[in-house]
Image: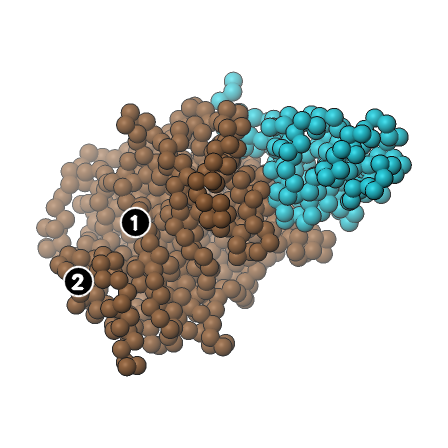
Amino acid sequence: MPKLLKDQQISNDDFQVLLQAPEEPILPEGHVLLHISSIDHAIKANGRHNGQVGIWFDSADEPETVANTLHQFEVIAINFPKFIDGRGYSLARLLRERLDYPGDIRAIGDILVDQIYYLRRCGFSSFRLREDQNPDHALAALQTFSADYQATADKLSPVYRLRHQL
Amino acid sequence: MYKYDNYDQQMVDERVLQFRDQTRRFLAGELPEDEFLPLRLQNGLYVQRFAPMLRIAIPYGMVSSRQMRKLAYIARRYDKGYVHFTTRQNLQLNWPRLEEVPEILEELASVQMHAIQTSGNCIRNTTTDQFAGVAYDEIIDPRPWCEIIRQWSTFHPEFAYLPRKFKIAVCGSEQDRAATQVHDIGIHAFLNENNDVRFKILAGGGLGRTPMVGSIIKPSLEPEHLLSYLDAVLRVYNRYGRRDNKYKARIKILIKALTPAVFSKKVEQEWSYLKETEAKLTQQEIDRVQSFFSEPDYPELTNINLTDLALSSESDFQWWLRRNVHPHKKPGFSAVTLTLKATADAPGDASAEQLEAISDLADEFSFGELRVSHEQNLIFADVPQRRLHELWLNLKPLNLATPNQGLLTDMICCPGGDFCALANARSIPLAENIQRRFDDIDFLHDIGELDLNISGCMNACGHHHVGHIGILGVDRKGEEYYQVQVGGASGHDASLGKILGPSFKMDEIPDVIDKILKTYIELRTPEERFIDTCRRVGIQPFKERVYAKAA
């Protein structure tokens, strides 16, 4: 099972990511993530299913189009088809800062240790590591920098404001 | 000059640790090459034709003598004793060992320097006017804004994996000496009718395969919103820039596809959510950064008559005064260019010995500071005029007093096929051929202001599109050939050169240039610069002359 880094802890990620909209409105056992194109399924199943139901976005998807329904889900995942595809960083900031999504934003797909720090700053709160990644290294990577220049989704004050606080 | 505080220092130090670990994992086989690649590029490390190449940032072109001495030390200790200054206010080491790069970064951090984001698909080193702060025609000093952008772009978590590289240049003078119109974002600082600082934002300029001049996307932006607006531009680009084709991934392609008006609307919408957040700059921080760029302690001097000074001196010195000494906003001071374009030296190269000597001269003549220009030259920004002759006497034995600033032989030239794995043709030997052919200083001065730009491939590191004469190395069935263009320019009147016709062999190029120059001499009106003649007569007369022998 893939490793999940969340709240400074390593655990197993027991969510199943469903790639396609299910033919039947019957979901597999346990926690599932449905693609945004199946959001109607996901809304219906939410609360009735025997596990948690979340949704996931691919890097080209536009969360703004479903802004009103997102708060119904406790987990939203953003997929990185390839680690060099940086669109997911912007999507996470949109979810956190513009759409005020308060739940868990999970990075899935091609998630490498060296991305973790920036992902966290953009609003991701959990990270499903690619199978070959070392979870301890990922945990350590969260501490890469002790200050940051930009105002981003992690709500920490950027250095240019910290400098002038008493 | 900006001085790091604890935050800045801590971040570059932490970067060194981060990269040390990444390099260790790569060398141990724990980090595959394709995953190390974007990480090393964001630390300025390429793997080149013969050896790795490390690109070090000189933010907005400012460097202290102390930093320069460290660069000389690094060149000697970790490389072959010389460095190469690029067109983007960076310098490159051509022969570092990959294993030693973390050590080099540590040396750099000890003098408040780094190689952060000098390469890769992220926001690159911000560039500006080499005369910023001293230019006679300056409206706003761009340097504090460059430093504010430097900090914002450093480790920006949202924009480290953009579709393509991203370059920003800032200009605050009547003349644009930073080629802002051929950058992904060009920022022009100006004063509005109430004398408040405002920025005009251009986007979508760039060279390479599809050269374009930028379009205005925001005519007037309040300074406190600079970073939130940049965030908005970059976010629109990050989300909608093309990722399917490397050659269509720059922001210029997106802006052209959408039209500048539609792109600008998308940015405005994005910005409306960002402008009143923590991203808004505080006045205290603007004041703090500006305080580092206050004037040095200029002694009260009066202007001396440089024409009289010239007349009473050696002819070499006269040429140098005319070409390499520039007007300064302070009475009694001049700015001085050391062109790194002496014949037979690769354009933009300097040896460790030269760097050390230059550092000593900077301490003695120019408040211990130097500038780097996008023409690959070095500048003493604050030289008392009464000491110009003394400075010149010191520069001559160092081979750093070539009086050719802005002339044909002061060419912009990429490292080309001798070093670069991307190049189709060599450019350094071509530059030398041209310098040898046109070594008559009277002739060069008669031709006057002329930008000759040479690139070894379509990536256009030598900015050939915006050279008054531009030369592009091309590959024809495995042989190196050179295509010639005329009519490009990089200032506020930026334009792209037009190709004359079929390409030439390297040894034909000096003759081709000679024909172009003779055409100019015949057609020019008194006082008309080469570029103005080109614009007035078009390329046809040049074309006819250059290809005449075939008829």
Give coordinates of residue B541: x percent, y percent: 24, 68
How many residues crowd mark 2 within 10 Å: few (<14), some (14–19), many (20+)?
Answer: some
Q: Residues within 10 Å of mark 1 (few under 14, many from 20)?
A: few
The foreground one among B501 and B230 is B501
Amino acid type assigned to the residue bearing label 1 in the image? Asp
Q: Quadrant of the C terminus of chain B?
A: bottom left
List x then y, in percent, for residue B250: 50, 50
Residue B264 pos. (x, y %): 46, 38
Task: Indicate the colour of chain A.
Answer: cyan
The correct choice, above or below, for B541 with respect to B300 in the image is below
Cα–Cα span, label 2 and label 1? 20 Å
Read off the residue under disc 1: B493
> Which chain does tag 2 point to?
B
Q: Is residue A52 left or right of residue B36?
A: right
Q: Which residue is mark 2?
A: B524
Residue at x 89% of width, y 36% of height: A29
Q: Which mark is residue B514?
A: none
Amino acid type, label 2: Arg
Outermost residue to the top: A166
Marks 2 & 1, CB-CB < 8 Å contact: no
Q: Nearer the viewer, residue B85 or A17?
A: A17
Would you place residue B54 above or below residue A148 in this image?
below
Q: Residue B136: x percent and y percent? A: 24, 40
* Residue at screen point 72% across, 37% down: A36
Does the rendering let one see residue B79?
A: no
Task: Kindly identify the residue that appears in the image at 35 percent across and 57 percent down.
Answer: B496
**Disc 1 on helix, strand or loop?**
loop
